Image (tube, helix red, strand yellow):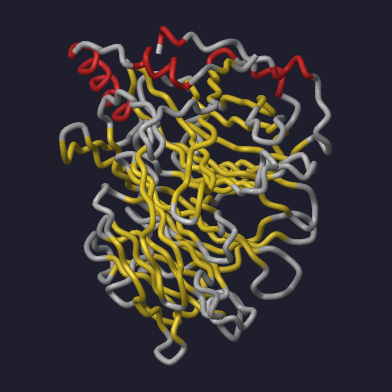
Amino acid sequence: MVFRLSYLFIVVILFLSITTNLLSQSKANLLEQLERNNIKATEIESNIYKIEYPWGKTAVYNYNELKPQPYTDASGNILDIDTTYIDLTTIDTSLYSNMFTLWKEVNFAGWPLYYGDENKNGQLEFYGIEGYQDSSKLVIYEIDSSKNFKLKHIYKDSIYYKYSNVATGLFDLKNIGQKNYFLVGLKNVGSTGIMEGLSFKNDTITKLPTSLDFILNDSISLLYATFGDFDKNGAVDLISSMLSGVCIAEYDSTINNMRYIYSYQPGTGNLHGFATGDFDLDGRTEIVASCINGYVSLIKNIGVHNYKYIWQTRVNTLNLYRQFITNDLDKNGKPEFWVAGFNLENGAWLVKLFAFESFNDTSYIPVKIIILKPIQSNFIWHTACFSRDIDNDGIEEIIIATNSSILMLKYNGSANENDYSVFYYNYFTFYVGWIQFLTIDNDDYKLFLATKDRFGKFITMIYKKNFNTSMYDDDRNNVKSLDINKL
């Protein structure tokens, strides 16, 4: 069973101090494990590391020990937040072994893998990376009527992905039914110097976004880019992270480029990604940003080209590198936004997810905490979190990928009751660099896992699901209690 306990009680337990020797040992284990997996760690501040992954991505992580504080309301009263604890080391993966089976393995990958039918031939294209770390190419593949993946285009070498987020978006920037493809390149081929944002449009021959349209203004970043019409004026906006702050730009057809609109620096550390939605249901867009030091910030659109910072809190974890939304899971009339991260507590690594709902127009309250104890006790490489209705019952599942584990949680609560059970869990023999669900040729969801083969080549493992409904044996959802005293 999933172990649930008052958050106030667990806070008292987690206040137990650890010795300096234990912290030093955990740090040594972390560095040893990272080096063993060809991951470079450079300490840039005390216990804050720049991590360089073998496939090129970089991130800044906070590896400080954290002693959580209780949550309080505006009057200082301690909040008792519904909390679920799951120990992944106790789950029997054989109970879920038939839910997904390997469908195909393809020789390209993406973080994420962008896709679309841009040449309008009824067949999906996939935009990703092919090859090895030091000899890779940015490519477009297309799936044909026989479900085979065919190479359609290789971008020239000057479109260089190393130490960037590779592709950053595929979006109908000009509202003309054709998407621009955004990539990060270098100003000097073969250099490791200054990067620049590149936007490609459809060419007249391939009908694919392979022709350079424009180079982004230097004042605008593509780091963790999110696209949409956030002020609802009909023009496409871009949110990105820049200099530890939030940058908002808008496409301007008169200059055929993105124009700077707004920026804000919360002063809370490196930002990593955004979630957007109307969380207080007032018709305006809110933008959620989170960072390595545990802060969550909200920026609200209050008019055309007009944004305002309205709210900030700090949660009881670090490295808040994931944000996603759910559409009113607890059926109380309010959508939820989530942030997820991980940190070291009493010598153990814990992954934590926090759900928030609107309290009023300018404040939000936590309504759910999910805490996971992962298989890997010495370090956390990566956490991916998002929501998707996997079993087609109209209710989103929460998907969490940590290192080589994939966990899917099913909501089974009622109004204002946030109960979850394990829907699927597997621990793979390879590292999961990225996870996403796609639909191919109106077929059911396929599970895409980006990774490398044993020779270091980028590959994607594609799995098909073997279930159509949410009906399953209740026994397989029993999760052993998490022994809190061992955290």
For the point 28% across and 19% down, the residue is 29
Residue 43, quarter of picture: top left
Q: Nearer the viewer, residue 54 or 222?
A: 222
Position of the N terminus, as image quadrant, is top right
In the shown orientation, is residue 412 left or right of residue 309? right
Position of the C terminus, as image quadrant, is top left
Q: Please, is residue 269 above or below residue 294 in the view? A: below
Q: Nearer the viewer, residue 218 or 302?
A: 302
For the point 73% across and 65% down, the residue is 123
In the shown orientation, is residue 483 left or right of residue 436? left
Q: Nearer the viewer, residue 471 or 275?
A: 275
For the point 65% across and 28% down, the residue is 420
Q: Residue furthest bottom?
A: 254
In the shown orientation, is residue 450 left or right of residue 257? right
Q: Position of residue 438 (x, y in %)?
A: 67, 51
Residue 49, quarter of picture: top left
